[in-house]
Image (tube, rainbow, N blue to C red):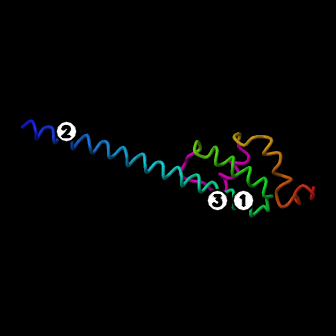
């Protein structure tokens, strides 16, 4: 009776531990997918706006550094607008973007 009881307890404890391991691995994968999507979003934005390489590198580094804390499961054009115009982008980095967009032609067009 004791052996059967201990086997039952062991099975329950093992299933709880394995469930938590699966949750940790799955959530880690979701975070990595989110960070990769944010990097792709920056790359697509940089390509579309002809952003210079230095600014793209700075933005990518900023995303790599901060994206894990933003984890969410969706993003779109409105999210990119929020990413750039929101409160989280450092002001000095935001100030360098207009001259860097479209190879500086946006600023020259004023």
Labels 1 and 2 touching (C-beta < 8 A): no
Q: In the rendered structure, which segment of residues is drawn in magenta?
A: 71-86
Residue 65 rendering spot, x and y as whole percentages: 64, 44
Labels 3 and 2 touching (C-beta < 8 A): no
Q: Nearer the viewer, residue 106 or 13?
A: 13
Q: Which residue is mark 2?
A: 9
CA separation in Å, label 3 and label 2: 47 Å
Q: Which residue is mark 3?
A: 40
Instruction: Name the residue at 75% across, 63% down.
Output: 48
Instruction: State which mark lies toward you, 3 or 1.
Output: 3
Instruction: Name the residue at 71% across, 43% down.
Output: 86
CA separation in Å, label 1 and label 2: 54 Å
Q: Nearer the viewer, residue 75 or 68?
A: 68
Q: Nearer the viewer, residue 55 or 71?
A: 55
Seen in the picture, residue 67 relative to 1 is either above or below; the reply is below
Mark sitting earlier along the chain (3/2): 2
- 41 to the left or right of 71: right
Mark sitting earlier along the chain (3/1): 3
Question: Helix, strand, or loop for circle 2?
Answer: helix
CA separation in Å, label 3 and label 1: 8 Å
Name which quarter of the figure residue 70 lies in.
top right
Residue 79 rendering spot, x and y as whole percentages: 65, 51
């Amino acid at each position: 009776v004791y052996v059967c009881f201990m086997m039952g307890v062991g099975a329950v404890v093992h299933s709880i531990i394995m469930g938590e391991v699966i949750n940790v691995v799955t959530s880690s994968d979701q975070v990595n997918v989110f960070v990769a999507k944010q990097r792709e979003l920056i790359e697509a934005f940089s390509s579309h706006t002809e952003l210079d390489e230095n600014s793209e590198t700075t933005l990518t580094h900023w995303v790599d550094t901060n994206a894990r804390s933003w984890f969410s499961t969706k993003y779109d054009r409105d999210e990119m607008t929020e990413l750039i115009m929101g409160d989280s982008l450092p002001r000095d980095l935001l100030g360098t973007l207009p001259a860097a967009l479209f190879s500086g032609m946006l600023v020259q067009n004023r």
